[in-house]
Image: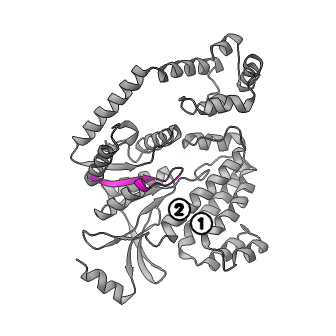
């Protein structure tokens, strides 16, 4: 990077040319090295610098990266950060009452970045900023021993009023266990499953395609009330699938979740008409690491499949979407939020203002739905034998 500064490199293309000329590295080799660094979102910052930092000289970014690299290689700095993490952990342990427990999984650098961005964006939301909430932030906690780490997290869950579960890139046993433990205590669980381009609104021809994406998302949210065939008919009526798609997806081998794969191509048709800057800005704002050596729109299509399937499983398909608390024998579901705004409004309502609900039929049962995310959070079975068994359970 120092040599690139001396050379007067002004953008990413010039940097690639310099690296190839001086070090014999092609684009793929250089980006592979970038992906292994400890620089936060290094790839996006270098490549899309003009989009996110139009007023900052490129050389300033290169100088910042040099300083970050020096710090990341300093064992003293690493030990200092670990010590701060331990001190934070002991501070958390001293808190008898905690408002929010954040259930996360952090295996890679990208996991830390994604969770940090999510927690920071959420707690700075207008609905929460003034509440001075006490929360357990796993990105600021460190304890080396895995058993002790697990015990600390169990204590935090017991003390917290609500658990916020970040669905992230993949689900793990730890996060699922944390959500189940929270429900067992009779406390609410909010599962945040992000969406791409849902909350973007601009005054341009692109807005037509963004509106179609929101219309598709709205129909997906209502899928919990539809059988497989009715859901397909609704999609066909709005031209989200073709006649051929309809016949294929009606096959006895197909399930509701298989529809997501087909819809991903409709989704991609819309995002193909949206400017790169809008897509990249939304990804960056939500903390997602794009594949720098791949197709951004294909990356977004794959995220659409992953997140919509996750949300459908949590809201609609999994037989254990309701769990019976041993404390009071009440079957509880989870709030499935699809935006940081929804998570913030839920937290404000749960902790301060109170929630509003409506009772609706769900299959052969009656369910209680919240007005913010329309998630089924309580259920009463219509089956008499099951109702009696629940009532008699001790």
Residue shown at 34% from the left, 33% from the top? 85
Is 58 placed above or below 6 here?
below
- Quadrant of the rendered image containing residue 141: top left
Are the residues tagged 2 and 1 within 8 Å (C-beta)? yes
The foreground one among 63 and 200 is: 63
Residue shown at 51% from the left, 70% from the top? 316
Residue shown at 67% from the left, 10% from the top? 6
Whether residue 131 can be seen here? no
Task: Specify the segment rendered in magenta.
Answer: 160-174
Q: Residue furthest bottom?
A: 384
Q: How many marks?
A: 2
Reading the image, the residue beneath label 2 is 311
Question: Residue 286, labelled with which disc?
Answer: none
Gap between marks 2 and 1 measured at Cα: 9 Å
Is 339 placed above or below 132 here?
below
Tell me where residue 61 appears, x and y as whole percent: 60, 22
Tell me where residue 304 appears, x and y as whole percent: 62, 56
Left or right: 170 as drawn, with respect to 104 = right
For discs 2 and 1, the disc positioned in front in the rendered view = 2
Q: Does 172 appear in magenta? A: yes
Tell me where residue 197 appears, x and y as whole percent: 62, 50
The foreground one among 76 and 359 is: 76
Tell me where residue 319 appears, x and y as whole percent: 46, 73
Left or right: 270 as drawn, with respect to 201 = right
Is 228 placed above or below 306 here?
below
Left or right: 60 as drawn, with respect to 83 = right
Reading the image, the residue beneath label 1 is 220
Helix or strand or loop: what does disc 2 sit on?
helix
- Quadrant of the rendered image containing residue 216: bottom right
């Amino acid at each position: 990077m120092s040599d690139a500064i001396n050379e007067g490199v002004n953008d990413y293309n010039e940097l690639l040319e310099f690296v190839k000329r001086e070090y014999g590295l092609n684009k793929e080799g250089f980006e592979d090295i970038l992906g292994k660094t400890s620089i936060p979102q290094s790839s996006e910052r270098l490549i899309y610098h003009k989009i996110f930092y139009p007023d900052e000289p490129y050389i300033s970014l290169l100088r910042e990266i040099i300083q970050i690299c020096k710090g990341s290689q300093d064992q003293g700095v690493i030990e200092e950060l670990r010590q701060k993490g331990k001190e934070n952990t002991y501070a958390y342990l001293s808190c008898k009452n905690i408002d929010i427990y954040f259930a996360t999984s952090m295996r890679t650098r990208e996991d830390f970045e994604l969770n940090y961005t999510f927690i920071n964006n959420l707690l700075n939301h207008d609905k929460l900023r003034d509440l001075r909430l006490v929360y357990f932030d796993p990105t600021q906690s460190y304890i080396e021993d895995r058993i002790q780490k697990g015990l600390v997290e169990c204590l935090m869950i017991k003390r917290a009023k609500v658990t916020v579960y970040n669905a992230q890139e993949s689900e793990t046993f730890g996060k699922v266990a944390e959500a189940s433990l929270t429900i067992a205590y009779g406390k609410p669980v909010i599962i945040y499953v992000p969406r791409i381009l849902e909350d973007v609104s601009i005054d341009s021809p692109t807005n037509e395609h963004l509106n179609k994406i929101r219309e598709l998302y709205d129909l997906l949210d209502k899928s919990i009330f539809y059988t497989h065939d009715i859901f397909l008919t609704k999609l066909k009526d709005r031209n989200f699938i073709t006649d051929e798609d309809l016949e294929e997806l009606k096959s006895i081998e197909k399930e509701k979740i298989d529809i997501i794969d087909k819809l991903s191509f409709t989704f991609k048709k819309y995002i193909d008409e949206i400017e790169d800057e809008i897509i990249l800005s939304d990804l960056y704002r939500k903390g997602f690491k794009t594949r720098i050596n791949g197709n951004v729109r294909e990356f977004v299509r794959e995220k659409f499949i992953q997140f919509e399937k996750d949300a459908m499983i949590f809201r609609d398909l999994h037989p254990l979407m309701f769990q019976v608390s041993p404390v009071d024998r009440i079957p509880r579901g989870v709030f499935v939020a699809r935006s940081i705004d929804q998570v913030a409004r839920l937290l404000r309502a749960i902790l301060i203002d109170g929630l509003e609900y409506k009772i609706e039929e769900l299959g052969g049962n009656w369910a209680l739905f919240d007005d913010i995310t329309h998630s089924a959070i309580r259920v009463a079975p219509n089956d008499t034998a099951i109702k009696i068994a629940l009532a008699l359970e001790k």
